[in-house]
Image (cartoon, grey):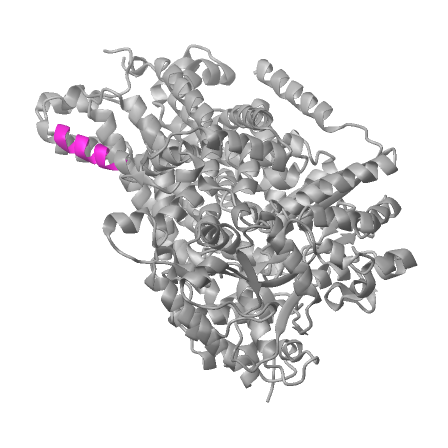
């Protein structure tokens, strides 16, 4: 069994039909996904004068990094926030939120999956339904609550607001995965004298690593790109996160060349992608499917 | 688990220290002009001067974009944690905010010097209620069309005299010629509703038989019927221009400030519809120099050759002072400063036409390096009908916008819209 | 697996539920109650003007509300079935297809999720313009985003484009946790790949599929940013979804500024999902019998 278990091709090795079909399908979708991204990237590396002329839409006539310089300057001058500062803010907000939400969700999902208590499914259903409320609806009541708690215009305000929203999702995903783990394992642990806490930490958590990794990635997404709460609850431009700044750039009344805008997008995205790529490898290395076999 | 908790606590403590900084008296100012260069730069200078003249006072100025402004303002005002000075969208919002008791009556707070700076602008009807001015206007502009002079010449047409504009039929001719050369006639961004309203109001005002009585206001209130030439002809004119391709079909999905304006800057069309000379500082530099004053401003299309000159002159940013502010006096002082001759000069330097012109020497102002700015001053001083564009009737205007868009989409007829307007405004017989 | 409920269980559940109640249920219930009032949002006391069912009657008479409702269901349909379906397909092909760079492929497909909706919207807006990339490739001169009938489908396409990676990642986690005994048994029996996929993998993935459908359902109802940036609900409200129409009533510049109506639209959204959740519970009970 290979240690880098990212795929399970073993049973499909001898199916040429599958091989061809999978390549075709994946290639097709990759092209559709990549094209707009490459388009944006290619826009960002064009010289401002030739932003609209390119071969096959993608290959720039003239290469230049002027757009990136413009984007940095634009952020500094018009938004009073530097890109590095925005990154720091986004990282603080996102990592605090993710840590908080994952921790609380793990425990709560354990409670939902392994215990019985009255109104369990009703509470669960309300949780699912509540996530569907668009952010703007809760804006004014949430503002009042945060004001009353005295934490407006701070990082905590959005961290807690995100937690309110995303804990249901965390519970949803983790509960599903906890319940998929074979009961024999839990029963074996109990027989061996484990407390419920030990059951959770020693048996369930290691097995749920793919689910937790997934959760972290999804929570990261939902907090990193959120901008309504970030804009309204943290007006101080020194704690602005990236989406707020990007939204301001993208919808302001000052014509910003699409080249500059594309550069701004790329600036915010490339570091994220790097982190994500590293993260992925790290989690996959820790997964052992062998634990399930006995 | 404990490691996580300490992490969380330390992050919380860290963010506490970042966000609580004891400041001296701080005035918070916000507006929705995010991205308008002239205003951003002007305010930066205002704040510098004001803070120097008033030690111990800090002014925090934040700009939002038009789209997201109310998302911040509503919770802030509603919860009592609002800024000291805030811009208000003129129109329906004025009544809502005023009725909630958030605005200081500036007429009462004004001293005679301040009033002298503003002159007539101290009592603009759209910004006042019950005889009291509720918001201090900052910048004035004429809402109009801008065209590239060289393109017009290229297509073989002559520009009208300054202050005059093309008729609807002339625009159709010009657009046909432009289309033949692969250009658009007008760049139009009707996704932003005011682009549609303001042109309509101008055309209706051209035909207003009882000017200066505001019949449009009466119609929006349901006091008179919408079934009259004054409203029918503009609707038909819009329909005619759309069907003749004066603007591209894609316009229906285009917004003004990013797409329409952007494409005009890229010279894809001859004219930009529903622009205002608040943009003189953002006009393309190569076409706006003393040697190459290549942009011409004109008012909305005339329904026919016989109508009087009709303009949309209005104010852009209008600042209200929060009646519940702790720093009301200092806030008033700042707003007063923005109307002073010193501030007006700074506005002008940055290409923004100040509203407080009563105490300024217009000849000096109109001799700046920015040809469009000079023209803007001239346009404001040109005699003609003036059109109200900031009506307070939200529902009726919503119905008007939806109706005109449906005419464009071919889903409704002019009669349908007229009937709907009568219904929505509650006009009965 | 049912353990004995004790004080520690409360401890496990309590922090999450507390935050959920304070920062989700509380504002949510306030909003639902507010749908029976009329207010602009600027008032210091939002509960001044009680108007009973007036807001609900108003939206039921508003043709654009019904358009928004229809569009929302189309959008949710697209998210739940099309997005989930394509992601399932891709996940299976990548997982079992022995790709050398499967991690890279997944990262690339996931990449759009990382982009801010504003960015995605602006990029696709450019592509859909009358003189944009799409028309040039296909050779048409069609005005895509001003089309009354097509605009919403374009929005659905862009939304699927962006979020397919999200669903894919979850499916992949499900595949990685898969019990491979059945597959190995099928190998021994000499089954072909079609049988293996349709009879074993897909049924085994059923819980993950349900999870994805729920997540996409929720996301579909909530979707606002992408609609707003692409069309603002236009042309003339023909591509509105409930979330964007709600925004129009509550916050839009030049809009009606009647937040009570916005809250009533939110009520409708909540009611839709809640009903679906109840249907799910009833269905599960029937299946378990």
Locate the N terminus of chain A by quadrant. top left
Q: Looking at the image, is B132 positioned above or below residue A169?
A: below
What residue is drawn where x is 62% and y is 57%? B277
Query: Is the magenta region chiefly helix, strand or loop?
Result: helix
Region in magenta: A19-29
Nearest the viewer among C89 and B259 is: B259
Q: Residue furthest front?
A: B291
* Number of on-image labels: 0
- When asked about the image quadrant of residue A40, the answer is top left
Measured as percent of width and height from the top left, residue A71 is found at: 52, 33
Give yes or no for residue C259 being in the magenta stretch: no
Q: Is residue C178 left or right of residue B316?
A: left
Q: Looking at the image, is B295 positioned above or below residue A285?
A: below
Q: Looking at the image, is A81 positioned above or below residue C162?
A: above
- When asked about the image quadrant of residue A245, the answer is top right
- When asked about the image quadrant of residue B35, the answer is top right
What residue is drawn where x is 66% and y is 56%? B374
Measured as percent of width and height from the top left, residue A17 is found at: 10, 31
Nearest the viewer among B261 and C119 is: B261
What residue is drawn where x is 75% and y is 63%? B127
């Amino acid at each position: 069994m290979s240690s880098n278990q990212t795929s399970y091709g073993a049973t499909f090795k001898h199916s040429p039909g599958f091989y061809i079909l999978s390549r075709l399908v994946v290639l097709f979708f990759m092209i559709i996904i990549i094209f707009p991204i490459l388009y944006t990237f290619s826009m960002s590396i064009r010289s401002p004068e030739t932003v609209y002329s390119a071969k096959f839409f993608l290959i720039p006539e003239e290469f230049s990094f002027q757009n990136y310089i413009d984007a940095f300057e634009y952020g500094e001058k018009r938004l009073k926030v530097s890109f590095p500062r925005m990154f720091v803010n986004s990282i603080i907000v996102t990592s605090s939120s993710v840590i908080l939400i994952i921790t609380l969700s793990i425990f709560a999902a354990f409670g939902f999956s392994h215990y019985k208590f009255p109104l369990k499914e009703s509470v669960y259903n309300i949780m699912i339904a509540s996530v569907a409320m668009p952010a703007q609806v809760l804006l004014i009541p949430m503002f009042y609550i945060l004001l009353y708690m005295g934490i407006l215009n701070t990082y905590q305000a959005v961290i807690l607001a995100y937690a309110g929203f995303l804990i249901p999702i965390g519970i949803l995903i983790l509960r599903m995965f906890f319940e998929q783990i074979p009961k024999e394992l839990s029963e074996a642990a109990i027989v061996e004298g484990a407390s419920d806490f030990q059951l959770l930490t020693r048996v369930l958590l290691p097995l749920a690593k793919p689910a937790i990794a997934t959760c972290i990635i999804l929570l990261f997404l939902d907090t990193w790109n959120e901008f309504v709460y970030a804009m309204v609850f943290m007006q101080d431009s020194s704690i602005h996160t990236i989406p707020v700044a990007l939204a301001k750039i993208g919808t302001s009344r000052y014509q910003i060349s699409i080249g500059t805008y594309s550069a701004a997008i790329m600036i915010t995205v490339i570091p994220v992608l790097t982190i994500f790529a590293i993260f992925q490898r790290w989690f996959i290395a820790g997964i052992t499917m062998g634990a399930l076999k006995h | 688990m404990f490691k996580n908790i300490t992490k969380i606590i330390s992050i919380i403590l860290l963010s506490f220290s970042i966000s609580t900084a004891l400041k001296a008296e701080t005035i918070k100012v916000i507006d929705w002009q995010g991205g308008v260069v002239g205003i951003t730069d002007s305010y930066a200078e205002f704040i510098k001067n004001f803070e120097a003249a008033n030690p111990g006072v800090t002014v925090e100025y934040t700009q939002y974009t038009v789209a997201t402004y109310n998302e911040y303002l509503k919770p802030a005002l509603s919860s009592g944690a609002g800024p000291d000075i805030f811009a208000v969208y003129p129109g329906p919002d004025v009544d809502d905010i005023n009725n909630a008791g958030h605005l200081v009556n500036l007429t009462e707070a004004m001293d005679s010097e301040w009033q002298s700076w503003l002159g007539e602008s101290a009592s603009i009807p759209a910004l006042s209620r019950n005889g009291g001015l509720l918001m201090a206007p900052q910048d004035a502009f004429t809402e109009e069309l801008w065209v590239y002079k060289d393109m017009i010449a290229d297509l073989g047409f002559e520009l009208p005299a300054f202050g005059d504009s093309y008729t609807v039929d002339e625009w159709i001719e010009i657009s046909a010629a432009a289309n033949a050369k692969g250009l658009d006639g007008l760049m139009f961004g009707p996704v932003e509703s005011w682009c549609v309203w303001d042109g309509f109001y101008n055309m209706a005002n051209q035909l207003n038989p009882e000017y200066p009585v505001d019949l449009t206001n009466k119609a929006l209130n349901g006091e008179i019927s919408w079934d009259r030439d004054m409203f029918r002809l503009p609707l038909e004119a819009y329909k005619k221009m759309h069907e003749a391709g004066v603007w591209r079909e894609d316009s229906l999905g285009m917004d003004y400030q990013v797409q329409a304006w952007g494409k005009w800057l890229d010279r894809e069309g001859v004219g930009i519809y529903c622009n205002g000379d608040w943009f003189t500082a953002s006009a393309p530099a190569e076409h706006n120099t003393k040697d190459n004053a290549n942009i011409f401003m004109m008012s909305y299309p005339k329904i026919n050759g016989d109508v009087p000159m009709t303009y949309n002159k209005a104010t852009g940013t209008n600042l209200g002072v929060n009646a519940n502010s702790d720093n009301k006096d200092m806030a008033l002082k700042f707003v007063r400063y923005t109307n002073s001759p010193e501030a007006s000069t700074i506005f002008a330097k940055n290409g923004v036409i100040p509203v407080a012109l009563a105490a300024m020497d217009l000849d000096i102002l109109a001799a700046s390096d920015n040809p469009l700015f000079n023209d803007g001053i001239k346009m404001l001083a040109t005699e003609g009908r003036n059109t109200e564009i900031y009506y307070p009737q939200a529902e009726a205007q919503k119905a008007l916008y939806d109706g005109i868009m449906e005419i464009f989409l071919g889903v409704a007829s002019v009669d349908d819209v007229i009937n709907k307007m009568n219904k929505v405004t509650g006009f009965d017989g | 697996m049912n353990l004995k409920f004790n004080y520690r269980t409360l401890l496990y559940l309590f922090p999450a539920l507390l935050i959920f109640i304070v920062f989700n249920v509380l504002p949510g219930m306030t909003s639902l109650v507010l749908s029976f009032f009329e207010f602009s949002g600027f008032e210091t006391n939002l509960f001044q003007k009680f108007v009973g069912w007036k807001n609900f009657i108003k939206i039921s008479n508003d043709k654009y509300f019904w358009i928004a409702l229809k569009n929302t269901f189309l959008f949710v349909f697209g998210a739940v079935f099309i997005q989930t379906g394509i992601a399932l397909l891709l996940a299976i092909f990548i997982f079992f297809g022995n790709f050398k760079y499967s991690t890279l492929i997944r990262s690339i497909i996931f990449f759009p999720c990382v982009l801010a909706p504003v960015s995605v919207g602006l990029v696709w807006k450019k592509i859909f313009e009358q003189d944009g990339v799409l028309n040039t490739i296909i050779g048409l001169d069609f005005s895509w985003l001003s089309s009354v009938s097509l605009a919403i489908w374009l929005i659905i396409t862009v939304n699927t484009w962006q979020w397919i990676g999200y669903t894919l990642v979850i499916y992949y986690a499900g595949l990685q946790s898969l019990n491979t005994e059945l597959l190995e048994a099928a190998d021994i029996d000499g089954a072909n790949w079609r049988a293996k996929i349709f009879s074993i993998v897909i049924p085994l993935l059923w819980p993950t599929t349900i999870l994805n459908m729920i997540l996409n359902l929720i996301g579909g109802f909530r979707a606002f940013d992408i609609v707003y940036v692409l069309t603002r609900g236009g042309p003339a409200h023909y591509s509105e979804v409930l979330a964007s129409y709600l925004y129009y009533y509550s916050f839009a510049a030049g809009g009606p500024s009647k937040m009570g109506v916005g809250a009533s639209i939110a009520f409708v959204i909540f009611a839709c999902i809640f009903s679906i959740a109840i249907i799910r519970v009833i269905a599960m009970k029937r299946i378990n019998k």
